Image: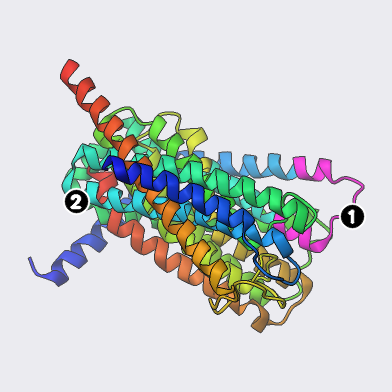
Amino acid sequence: MTAERAILNGMRGAVAIFSKDLYSELRTRYALNSLLMFVVVTLSIILFSTAGETVSPSLSAGILWIIIFFAAMSGLSRSFVSEEERGTSMTLQLWVTPSSVLVGKLLFNSLLIYILNVMIILAYMLTMPSFVVKTPLIFFTTILIGTFGLSAASTFIAAIISKANSKGTLYPVLSFPILLPLLMSVIDATRLSVDGAAFGEAIGDFKIMFSYCVVVTTVAIVLFDFVWRD
Amino acid sequence: MKNWMKIGIGVWIAAVVAIGLAMPIGYIPGLGAKARIIFFHVPMSWLAVLAFFMSMWYGIAYLRKKDMTLDIKSATAAELGFIFSILATITGSIWAKFNWGSFWNWDPRETSIFVLLLIYGAYFSLRSALEIEERRATLSAVYSIVAFVTVPFFVFIMPRMMTGLHPGEGSPAPIVNASGKMYMDANMRYVFYASLLGFSFLYVWLFQLRSKIGILSYNNHTEIE
């Protein structure tokens, strides 16, 4: 088999995994529904605890990412954990290459968390009066790159914890140190966008976010074989 | 490790401690005698990072060769790294109270050692959550590699982007400055390097002892089965 055919087959496999996950999600809408409820719950806790207080704009930027982080932590592990629980991971191992599985799951998780983030941000902007984005370009770029990095790292950690006991508790514990460089730069960039900084001021943060995405995705693809064929 | 080497390490470190505390170090603006922490605190942080690297190194070796002794060595390196990062955090924190006025300031280097502690903690929780030995070895090796590639973001990139409090960051740079040049007088530099060397040998010794114990108990336990 030539290299081009192998790549083409791998892409076909990835698309197949992605559409399988999408169909099974559309059939039950389990992940999206429960995640939306999670966001509503988290947001109301924050609103109750800040009721009557004026939250400073830069603090509100941090709170936004706390919601996004924990929403991702409660939703993204399902992609691999459900395969282990239903015992379907062997079937996937037979049919597609490991990298197709990773890319397919990564695409699905990215789609899920992009949709989720749009909802979170809309709800947050409506309920948090101090959160006003003054430089939309910085904000959109941050969401675009930052969400992908979040989904790349957490998809890979999900593959690791799906083999372990006490999956739910372990997931944020393992993900947080890995995600921290990304979180710090996205929080900083969001703060800049709320403060109305010029686009040039956030370039440093974008460089970190972008290199983080490249590094984590590369490492995930290289090491996924070991995790998957275990 | 030979007996004379063990005694040598003991004498060497005792000498470094004594000289480091007693020798005149000259006038250092803003720090004074508090600068002596460099002889103890910096080697510990260095070992914390070195052990983290060794853990990843043995992890990669395990993934290539699938030899359980390599996994034991990887875990041993992580255990020692954890101890040394706790020591570096405590010594640094006590020093920070006297120099900067509070135990913890979220200076970029404090953040990076904090992340290192978190990673070690996560590594051990992952190990304890995996019961099958081969699986535990593979997954913890993978995790230590992933963790190792994200750490440079803290150690090299962040301290250069944010102004920190550590000596050498910010405008008065009495000992080590951002370009990596050292402004220590010659005597102080010798003691510093001697201390680095002594603690590194101590690490090697501890590492050999711990991994020997680990391998022996692993063999014992597989024989019983």
> Which residue in the structure is indicated by mark 2?
B64
Regarding residue A38, the answer to whether it shows in the image is yes
On screen, residue A97 versus residue A24, left or right, reads left
Q: Is residue A142 above or below residue B223?
A: below
Residue kind at label 1, given as amino acid type: Thr
User: Alpha-carbon distance for marks 1 and 2?
Assistant: 56 Å
* Secondary structure character of the magenta stretch overall: helix
Regarding residue A21, the answer to whether it shows in the image is no
**The N terminus of chain A is located in which quarter?**
bottom left
Q: Which residue is drawn at 30% across and 30% down?
A: B213
**The C terminus of chain A is located in which quarter?**
top left
On screen, residue B176 versus residue A167, left or right, reads right
Where residue A195 appears, as percent x and y from the top left, is 78, 72
**Labelled disc at residue B16:** none
Where residue B23 appears, as percent x and y from the top left, is 62, 60
Return the chain for callout 2.
Answer: B
Q: Which residue is drawn at 54% across and 41% down?
A: A74
* Residue nearest the observer in this picture, A96 or A209: A209
- Single out the mark in the foreground, 1 or 2: 2
* Secondary structure beneath label 2: helix
> Which residue in the structure is indicated by mark 1?
A54
Residue kind at label 2, given as amino acid type: Arg
> Which segment did they paint magenta?
A45-63
Q: Is residue B222 above or below residue A151?
A: above
Q: Which residue is drawn at 38% across and 50% down?
A: B201
Q: In this view, does A106 lie above or below A89?
A: below
Return the chain for callout 1.
Answer: A
